[in-house]
Amino acid sequence: MDLDQLCRAVSSPAALKNLPGYVEKVNPALIGLRRVIWPYSFRSEIHCALTNCGARHKSGVMIELEDGTVSNIGHICGADADKYSTKFSEEMLKMSASRLREAMLPLLLDRVALQKIEQQARAAYHAGEQWLRRRLAFSALFPDAAKEVERRYSSGSSMRVVDIVERGAAEISELIASGQFRNRAEARYKEIDKGAIRGASVMSLSEPRISSLWRRADALLAADPLALEIAALQRLFTEANQLPHDALQVMKACEAAQGFFAPENCKLMAMLPMPQTAKDALMELTLGRLDGYATRRPQKNTVDERLARPISKKQRDLQKRLEATLREAKRFAK
């Protein structure tokens, strides 16, 4: 067993002192520091081996000196100017980076685990794309309802829908007599709870959020963890843990979408403020109609609608070529 493995197995002051080449006293002015090997944390205290310290502590680090001997010092005092100063700080960073690598590499080198993460991201991408098209179709067909639901979802407001009705004269008189209201104007109307809109988290689906899943999965599988610096390795490790979570959240939004577009939920949303024609259409809404709208290319559009719709790079290039052709034709006409 090599020295590093022996140091990692140390669990008490006695085991530390039994390490091969261990010395109890170290004069930092006479012997230099080679490296910091491993940290320790004991239940009982042990003396710092530095001759100009000697403080008792429970937590410190095992070190290797330039002559090959081994000792122990405090994890703070070693950086003092009269001890090992910046050399100690540098070696502590190296040790920390080494420990981080050992903790992160098992996951990042596990191709089976990474491929499972990729599958989760791909599945969330495909499901998200489908439900995003339906959500966008819903927003186009029923803009008033979509804006109200999105406003409530974004602000954390209640999703409950209430119907305001006028009370009868007898009911108003009873309420005033019981002291619940002071006059007829206050008691005139009442709210009737019709239920809560379900699945509003479908509004969180967006093209950047969904398309990034695919790109991130590709980047995760393409990375070479062994060739990365510690900072880049940490980012990759964070991504390997964050991507499954983000994919799961997209899948949850897709599951919520099923409840959002359910017939009873559409009937509830039809009670929100909107034109009567929109209310009637929303009452009869089906996923088939949403899918049909999403795949159908609009034939008639106003000038404002055409200008408002973003065009692709291919369309922009085509438009530029047409404009250049027109300019050339005008030049020859002159």
Image: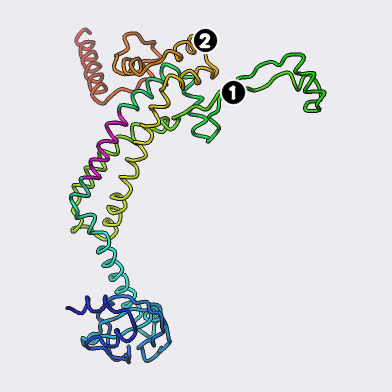
3 lies left or right of 206? left
Residue type of the residue flagged with mark 1:
Val
- Give the quadrant of residue 120: top left
- Residue 291 x %, y %: 32, 18
Badge 1: residue crowd in 10 Å (few <14, some 14–19, many ≥20): some
- Residue 62 x %, y %: 30, 80
- Residue 149 x %, y %: 49, 26
Residue drawn at point x = 25 percent, y = 64 percent: 102
What colour scheme has been applied to the protein in the rendered image? rainbow
Q: Which quadrant: the N terminus?
A: bottom left
Q: Nearer the viewer, mark 2 or mark 1?
A: 1
* Secondary structure state at the residue bearing disc 2: helix
As drawn, the label of residue 162 is: 1
Q: Which quadrant: the C terminus?
A: top left
- Residue 266 x %, y %: 46, 19
* Magenta region, residue range: 116-129
Residue type of the residue flagged with mark 2:
Gln
Helix, strand or loop for the magenta stretch, by majority: helix
- Give the quadrant of residue 234: bottom left
Badge 2: residue crowd in 10 Å (few <14, some 14–19, many ≥20): few
* Secondary structure state at the residue bearing disc 1: strand
Q: Earlier in the sequence, mark 2 or mark 1?
A: 1
Which sits in the foreground, 333 or 323?
Answer: 323
Q: Is residue 120 magenta?
A: yes
Q: Report which residue position mark 2 lands on.
A: 276
Mark-to-mark CA distance, 2 and 1? 17 Å
Residue drawn at point x = 34 percent, y = 27 percent: 131
Q: Is residue 278 magenta?
A: no
